Amino acid sequence: MKLVFSFLLVFATLFGRAQQNVYFLKNNGKYVTAKDSADFIRVVTLPDSGSVLYNVIEFYKNGVKKTIGKSTKIDPPRYLGQVVRFFENGKRASLYQQSDKGTVGAAYEFYPNGTVYRILKYPDSVKTDNIFAENYLITANSDSLGNKLVVDGRGYYKGFDSKFKYIDEEGRVKNGLRDSIWNGTDKNLKVTFTETYKEGNLIAGAMIDSAGAKFTYAGTRMTSPKFNGGNRAFGNYLGKNIIYPDLERKNGIYGVVILQFVVEKDGRVTDVRVQKSVSPGLDKEASRVIKNSPLWIPGTRFGKPIRVTYAVPINFLLQDG
């Protein structure tokens, strides 16, 4: 029996044969075994006739639909085509198109009362590996009463935090791009910031935190953690250091272990946890290698290094030959 090991930087899983697969999850993405312990439920069914895409429906604990979409994988989902998300009150939260490269085309987002919040336009291809990059055009923006703030990519934009509690950024939009001076605040991080844009490019930004410390940045507000050397180097590291456990090899046990961990401000990897288990041996081996990972390049927000929770699927395969 030939051993084959690979890693996936996008979520993937093995195809199953059940008519329906049910998963219980926490909001942080962790899988749990009991429905009562879950924040939401994911149900995956086989493709419709003539399709190769699995049907995915997620539900809040109150039974209201959370997400509807189609996926190339059983679980975790890798959406393809239209995806619709809902608030817990049942009203639509967003509607967008997903390709194998990311979100594409027009994306519609709504206030919890059902009013259109904003319309964004994404490019047909993703040109950056920064998972925090904002690569969209702002084509429309309204307040919760429906009063138009941005029309046809021009106006004064007011953006809200994820829970629509407060305005977290505002500034002028021209041709769908941020322009001139923008101001904002992040109450979770307890920071305020001022940024200067030209044709959508972040020329300069300055942030002040709760202690009065000032940080400057340019190009982007946030950067994601990176393995030193990039994705290829990370794959090489895993391939050279993973040792397939004897018990799993002998018993033909394989699958995708999903690990969640924290990349600290200094690049250290900590708090490694199994988000989705395959077997004790595979879980332990995947965790061991990630725990022994060399320093990463830390993520930043407003120019300041931050702790970032990261997730990586590690695919263990056994192949005859």
Image (cartoon, rainbow, N blue to C red):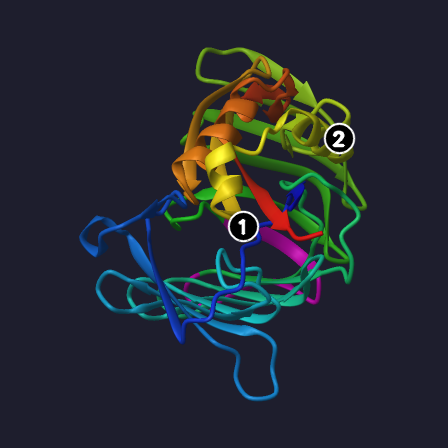
Q: Which residue is mark 2?
A: 230
Q: Residues within 10 Å of mark 1 (few under 14, many from 20)?
A: many
The three-letter amino acid code for the residue at tag 1 is Lys
Q: Vertically, is 14 above or below 217?
A: below
Q: Residue at x 77, y 45 (%)?
A: 200
Q: Quadrant of residue 218?
A: top right
- Which region is colored magenta? 144-159
The three-letter amino acid code for the residue at tag 2 is Gly
Label 1 secondary element: strand
Q: Residue at x 65, y 51 (%)?
A: 319
Q: Quadrant of residue 174?
A: bottom right
Please name whichever residue, 2 or 19, is drawn nearer the observer in this view of the structure: 2
Label 2 secondary element: helix
| Residue at far left of view | 36
Residue 172 in the figure: left or right of residue 126: left
Picture disc at residue 158: 1
Q: Residue 110 at what x, y percent from top left?
A: 46, 65
Q: Residue at x 53, y 79 (%)?
A: 47
Q: Residue 17 at what x, y percent from top left?
A: 46, 71
Indicate whether residue 156 is drawn in magenta. yes
Please name whichever residue, 213 or 275, is drawn nearer the observer in this view of the structure: 275
Q: Quadrant of residue 271?
A: top left
Residue 21 in the figure: left or right of residue 54: left
What is the tally of numbered marks visible in this picture? 2
